[in-house]
Image: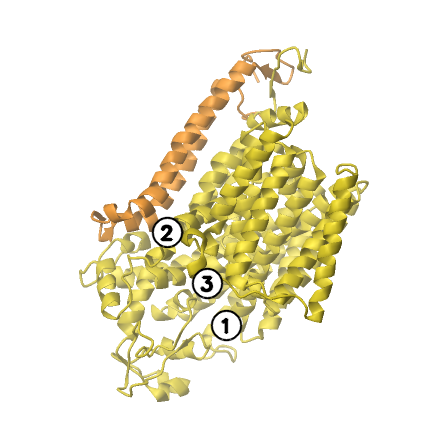
Amino acid sequence: MAEAPEDGEGGAEGVHDISEASFKAYWRENLTLMGVLLAIWFLVSFGAGILFRDFLDQFSIGSAPLGFWFAQQGSIYVFVILIFVYSALMHRIERKYDVDDDQG
Amino acid sequence: MDIMGMSPTLFWTALFVITTFGVYIGIAVWARAASTDDFYVAGHDVHPVFNGMATAADWMSAASFMSMAGIIAFSGYDGSVYLMGWTGGYVLLALLLAPYLRKFGKFTVPDFVGDRYYSQAARIVAVICALFISFTYIAGQMRGVGIAFSNFLHVPIEAGVIVGAIIVLFYAALGGMKGITYTQVAQYCVLIFAFMVPAIFLSLQITGSPIPQLGFIGNAQDGTPLLQSLDTTLTELGFSAYTDGSKAMIDVFAITLALMVGTAGLPHVIIRFFTVPKASDARKSAGWALIFIAILYTTAPAVAIFARSNFIDTVNESRWSVEAANDPAARGDLGEGDTPAWFYNWRDTGLLNAEDRNGDGLIQYRADPAVNEVTQLDRDIFVLANPEIGGLPAWVIGLVVAGGLAAALSTAAGLLMVISSAVSHDLCRKVLFKGMSDTQELLVARIAAVAAVLVAIYAGINPPGFVAAVVAFAFGLAAASFFPAIFLGIFWKRMNKQGAIAGMATGLIVTALYIVHFKIGFSAAVIGVCALLAAIAFVVLIFGTKGEVGGTGRLLLTILAAGLGVTALLGPFGVLPGFAMGTADQWFLGISPEGFGSVGMALSFAVSIAVSVMTPAPPREVQDMVEEIRIPSARAHVGHAPANPAPAE
């Protein structure tokens, strides 16, 4: 509760306003991050596992064709990573604009 | 070898089932719900990792546990739609929905839809969607419980369904979301242990690797690449290669998309993220949930390959013994080259059968039905029989049964919660009887849970035809109704109630019609039941939207309700027309009913946006609310220009 709010009035409990410009910038950064991560989400599942599967199947990982592996294994691993990456990067963005929920 | 007069398998199964059930009941007594907050959202104080586990158990149903590996084993590449579809949705949840819905901070999905679209009509449409989706889903779970009981504990399906239902009811009605959450954590531990133990043993036996995910890409013990030799063997036997699918690419794409988006829109999954303390925890919790789910979902395709390879190796061209088939005592001295004992054991349950039709003394497993001698092969067999196929001790079989029951019960409990809160909170308190107190609401919630369980028991014992189409219905409808309404509600401030109602209704109706036409068929009886359900929905709409819908609108609704009611009443007199079920060559763009949710979703988005643009913008307070939910912190607010001074000034 010690940090000074960027804009507006700071209340006793750390309640504060953020400017509309700051809110828009925060939201735009969030949307950009989401866009990038969702593009990866699409590429590993619909891309590697479905649309480009035949092309990728000429390569292999271990003894499994690569496209097939992405459809049944790889995409799921990437999904898990994507969520934790988003969680971490989003937290940074929120702190930058002082809208994080670290203290409720 | 009998223990207390029971065979070892029966003894261990009974022991595990009774012990785990005792644990669930104990947790329920410990985690009783005292307030509506406890009952609906577990007091908002569940740790993200625990919520992740509970979500995973809630999510993984009897079908995930028992059937999925088998479905993949039979369909090879085509099975990927379930693997990607039922995991990829969590990315959408974590990025697009969960944190914002948590910040919104209410109890249910219809709460959000009703408040965001400042409309009782929108709330009622959401309640109807939630109830329909959850009832389809819960009937399937209860059926799974009954089958598990009857196959392993030799009690009739009816008794199994009733015992399972009473257990779920006990902890759902007593503990609400709080009881359910902590029971689900325990159930996750049981089910994942039960799934992994046989999988690891099987992987060791077949590939020498203790990690099934590595076995998946590894070589068989004789050094040949596992997947390639499976492809070769299957092709020789007349099947299509394992790594080739038979579905069209557009259909694989559409099904995967519908399952992903549907997952993100399923109410029993969404409400789990209301239970964590804050928005950022909702994101983390979705990540943990996916880790816990991924453990099973990346193991299942490995189990599928092992089981299919193993089945062919041990059963195809094996010596069939009529004596062993008829007399369990003769199964002890079966040896190399004989049809294995587990095959005969499972034959007794009716899930598996073979017949030496050409009289050569051997069993031929072939794709061609004219020469295939494996006459019955249930897809669930690959998970259920794994412990015996792997020669594992009897206690492992008991464990697998307890795991399957844990999977079914945890999902059923989550669904029961949605049904009970939709009736008590959304329908009764927010629409029909606005003056209810918390105590009355809790009472109604518990009564609704009891009523829902009775319906689920009935549906589990006499499964209605639509249970077979549960995947298409639940995911298709969630994708086509909830997802667009919630997504646009968060990401597009301009989205208004007209757009939301039109979009949800279009998505729901078009998707439901397509699925019924191609999965069930519009027979006279089906038309009658649909008309009856629609008439009830309209009556609720008429009562619930007093003051919101004008005179002409109400008149129109009344006429529609009356027309549908009369249509339903005509049903028993046999005057309704019937239509033949649609066939695969009539599919829209070659998209199966399972994948049609994608089309319904696109349509719902298009209608929502078009109608919103043509009608007035939502009120200022609603637009401010959208800004508030986009900010995780409860302390920060968006300060507006003088037109809307912030309260602090």
Q: Earlier in the sequence, mark 1 or mark 3?
A: 1
User: Badge 2 local density, few (<14 within 10 Å), some, or many (20+)?
Assistant: many
Residue B583's mark? 3
Question: Would you name the residue on which mark 1 appears?
Answer: B152
* Chain B shade in the render: yellow
Q: Which chain is orange?
A: A
Q: Name the residue carrying label 2.
A: B298
Please, what is the three-letter code of the amino acid marked with disc 1? Phe
Mark 3 closeness class: few <14, some 14–19, many ≥20 residues within 10 Å: few
Q: Position of residue B307 (x, y in %)?
A: 33, 65
Q: Say if mark 1 contacts mark 2, CB within 8 Å.
A: no
For discs 1 and 2, the disc positioned in front in the rendered view: 2
Q: Amino acid at mark 3?
A: Thr
The quadrant where residue B416 appears: bottom right
Residue drawn at x 29%, y 88% as measured from the top left: B359
| Chain under numbered label 3 | B
Query: Position of B267 compared to B193: left or right?
Result: right
- Residue at image coords 63%, 46%: B178
For the residue pair B544 and B222, the one nearer the viewer reads as B544
Distance (Cα) linking label 1 and label 2: 27 Å
Total numbered labels placed on residues in the image: 3
The N terminus of chain B lies in quadrant? bottom left
Q: In which quadrant of the rendered view does residue B634 lie?
A: top right
Secondary structure of the residue carrying tag 1 is helix
> Disc 2 to disc 3, how far (Cα)?
34 Å
Asked whether residue B43 is in view, the answer is: yes
Res B264 seen here: no
Relative image position of residue A1 (x, y in whole percent): 57, 18
The chain to which mark 2 is attached is B
In this view, which residue lies farthest toward the left?
A: B223
